[in-house]
Image (tube, rainbow, N blue to C red):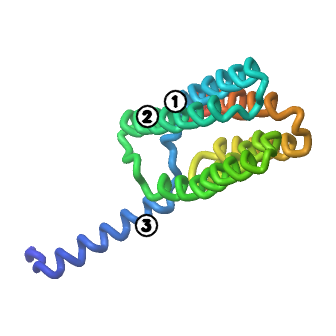
Amino acid sequence: MSIPTHPAREQAEETLAYIRQTMESASTYTAVSGWGMIAIGAIGLIASWLAWAAGTPALLVVWIPAALVALAMSAVANSAKAKRLEVPLWTGSFRKMVWGLAPALAAGAFLTLALTAQGTPHLLPGTWLALYGAGVTAGGTFSVGAVRWMGLTMLALGALALLQSDLGLVLLAVGFGGTHVAFGFYIVQRHGG
């Protein structure tokens, strides 16, 4: 048995790194936390109730902090599930999922500013739901199927809210609240929490 030379070992290590990277990129992100989604749904329901109590469906002083808390909750919950499953959090599929979601969230932030400045806040619920749904659908192509279906559900709710702006607050509650809770429970049952 001969000992591989230094160049041969380097080539073998590069080949293994390439194989690992290729397999990681082709895999699905399974550390989406169902419990995290349920918590996000609870935040959505609380925000909906606060906006209803104030009489303003798209009350930014309620929804912006709710979105930031939900984002932090998602990060903590997904990180905890990845650690529990002993899988890396920042995998190729997770990066793709984030890159699928990020442009839609950025567009939502810009449109929030523009629609508020133009005096058309009644379009915010539909805009938020539709763009979040589009982002989750795009990012969800690198995750479990339930994530894509949740995104499509949000997209449909957003379309309805844009067509029926008087239902905006109800659809925000259903989308950011009920939909997250329902799909969260599904992920808990089917994909280990």
* Disc on res. 113: none
Q: Which three-letter amino acid code belongs to the residue tagged 1?
A: Gly
Q: Secondary structure at mark 3?
A: helix
From this viewpoint, which residue is outermost toward the top? 53
Q: Is residue 60 above or below residue 22?
A: above
In the image, taking residue 125 as reference, residue 165 lies left or right, namely: right
Left or right side of 151 for 82:
left
Q: How many marks?
A: 3
**Whether label 2 touches label 1, CB < 8 Å:** no
Q: Which class describes the residues within 10 Å of circle 1: few (<14), some (14-19), or many (20+)?
A: many
Residue at figure coordinates x 43%, y 34% from the top left: 76
- Secondary structure state at the residue bearing disc 1: loop
The percent coordinates of residue 157 (x first, y second) are 81, 40
Q: Amino acid at mark 2?
A: Val
Query: What residue appears at the point 12 percent right and 77 percent down from the top-left corner?
Result: 4
Residue of label 1: 193
User: Camera-side residue: 100 or 84?
Assistant: 100
Q: Quadrant of the N terminus?
A: bottom left
Q: x%, y% of residue 152?
A: 75, 47
N-term mark: 3 or 1: 3
Q: Which residue is mark 3?
A: 22
Q: Say if mark 2 contacts mark 3, CB within 8 Å.
A: no
- Which-is-in-front pick, marks 2 and 1? 2
Q: Is residue 113 visible?
A: yes
| Residue at screen point 72% across, 49% down | 117
